Image (cartoon, coloured by chain):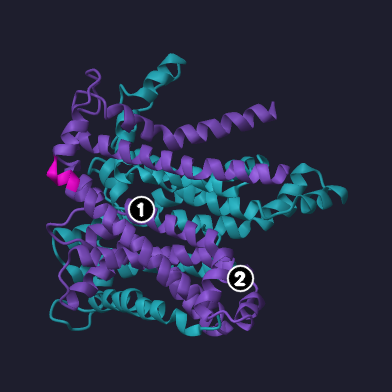
Amino acid sequence: MIKFIKRFYLVIMFVFLYAPIAALMVLSFNSSKYMSRWDGFSLKWYEAMFSSELIMSALKTTLIIALLSAVISTIIGTAACIGISRMKRKPRAIVMGLNNIPMVNAEIVTGISLMLCFIAFGISLGFGTILISHITFCIPYVILSVMPKIKQTEQSTYEAALDLGASPVQAFFKVVFPDIRPGVLSGFLMAFTMSLDDFIITHFTKGAGVNTLSTLIYSEVRKGIKPSLYALSTIMFLAVLILLVIANLPKGKNRELVKEN
Amino acid sequence: MGKKSLAAPYIVWMAGFIVIPLLFVFYYGLTDKSGAFTLENLAAIASPEKVSALLRSLKLSVLSTAICLLLAYPLAMILKGLHVKKGSFVVFLFILPMWMNFLLRTMAWQTLLDRNGVINNVLAFFHLPGINIINTQAAIVFGMVYNFLPFMVLPIYNVLIKIGDDTVEAARDLGADGVQTFFRVIFPLSMPGIVSGITMVFVPALTTFVISDLLGGGMVLLIGNVIEQEFTFTANWNLGSGLSLVLMVFILISMVLFAKYDKDGEGAAV
């Protein structure tokens, strides 16, 4: 009985989390443009999506910013983790405290503060300012996932590599990096996802003329959102789901095989 | 890897894009349009309209944080009980929805919660009374719980899976029953996760302007909406910054709590 209640609760919670996603997927095939009415199956929103320059350019901006901010924040963040782990207690506490600010602070305050700063220094708001802002809030997530891995690595293995004639760069990529790779990867994915899904900070730092998908959607809320945006997010969601399943399945099987042998 | 200097780029970055921008909020918040020092922007929170927005925000965010905690704790316990080999899979299930834009996901609840929507049809099928919460404060709390629940589940789950079975068994061996084991062993050990979960839900819920915009139908004004409007409509940056400073007092309280339970600076968030 208790087992049944547990299962039931689990199912309810995941229905709660995924219901809106299912709803959007269904609505993307709705030939009516109203959310509340079903007028039959149609693919017209998918056609409309590909022919809409507005949506395609917002998609391009969103993906480029997510990719760039994930790559840059992963590099800066991983390097920072190595540096921070070598620091003494006090400076480390200060750096980690500052690192927590973008995560703990309200996004609206982070967005406003960056906007005021850019304008005060005469940097015009646009693609560049969105990118800088995204990198700023992504690095803490990279550090959060890389730091525990760095702490687990042994300083001595790195030194052993040096003694055996490796250059510091070789020692890093051949000895240290394989140990911390899972953390770096999950930091990268986290950064990419956070950047992709961000609205509030982008809203304040984007300026006129540039749109990410989030800001495009927000600007359409009042007029009524076009279902072509549901179509786009359905495709993106399914693409990620398939990619991640493919990336995870064979590896898991290999591991099991190795264990069995 | 004995290079402290590897942290240098990030330290410069933090100075430029975290510290200096925050100083600008202080500067604008404590000056008037001519640049003279004033406390008026802070005092502006006392106007009836803004006080009621702040109190409303506090009420809704406390409520949604409490609901999140009540929903998340059993969920985290059940997930721990599944003994999934890869904890990352559980994390993945909660992060996956973020790949569908959060504005769209929130909007989708409009359809689902509609008077003639799916949920009311299901309720009617089971002869249960329908719910009619669209464009009310209840809808906003619902949206907050929906959006921020993962931020409560993940820290608690991450702390719970670190509690070894032997700890629980030891408590049992020493004569504690299930309830005692929970309240005297598991619950106290999970406090850091609970605290970081509360911070991660309370702050975004307190400061949101998007959820109230989308699910409140523009009828419910939160402090986030007031601040956002000072920047986008009335363009009164000084007042907007002043109100942000007031808001930050509440965030600071959360940060102090966060720091107290997060001494290693590791964070239980991810």
Rendering coords of residue B113 (x, y %)? 34, 30
Closest to the observer, B49 or A135: A135
Q: Position of residue A87 (x, y in %)?
A: 55, 83
Q: Chain of mark 1?
A: B
Q: Secondary structure at mark 2?
A: helix
Boundaries of the magenta span: A52-56
Q: Colour of chain B?
A: cyan
Nearer to me, A200 or A127 = A127
| Callouts 2 and 1 close, C-beta under 8 Å | no
Locate the C terminus of chain A and report the quarter of the image it occupies: top right
Q: Amino acid at mark 1?
A: Ser
Compared with B53, A81 (above or below) is below
Q: Is residue B43 visible?
A: no
Chief SS of the magenta region: helix
Rendered view: A74 above or below B155? below
Which residue is depicted at the point 18% across and 38% down? A50
* Residue at mark 2: A151
Q: Nearer the viewer, mark 2 or mark 1?
A: 2
The answer for which chain carries disc 2 is A
Q: Residue at the spot x=35%, y=42% of the render?
A: B100
Crowding at mark 1 (Cα within 10 Å: few <14, some 14-19, many 20+):
many
- Whether residue B20 appears in this view of the structure is yes
**Colour for chain A in the figure:** purple
Specify the label residue A140 is tagged with. none
Looking at the rendered image, the quarter that the N terminus of chain A falls into is top right
Point out the residue furthest to the right here: B174
The residue singled out by tag 1 in the image is B57
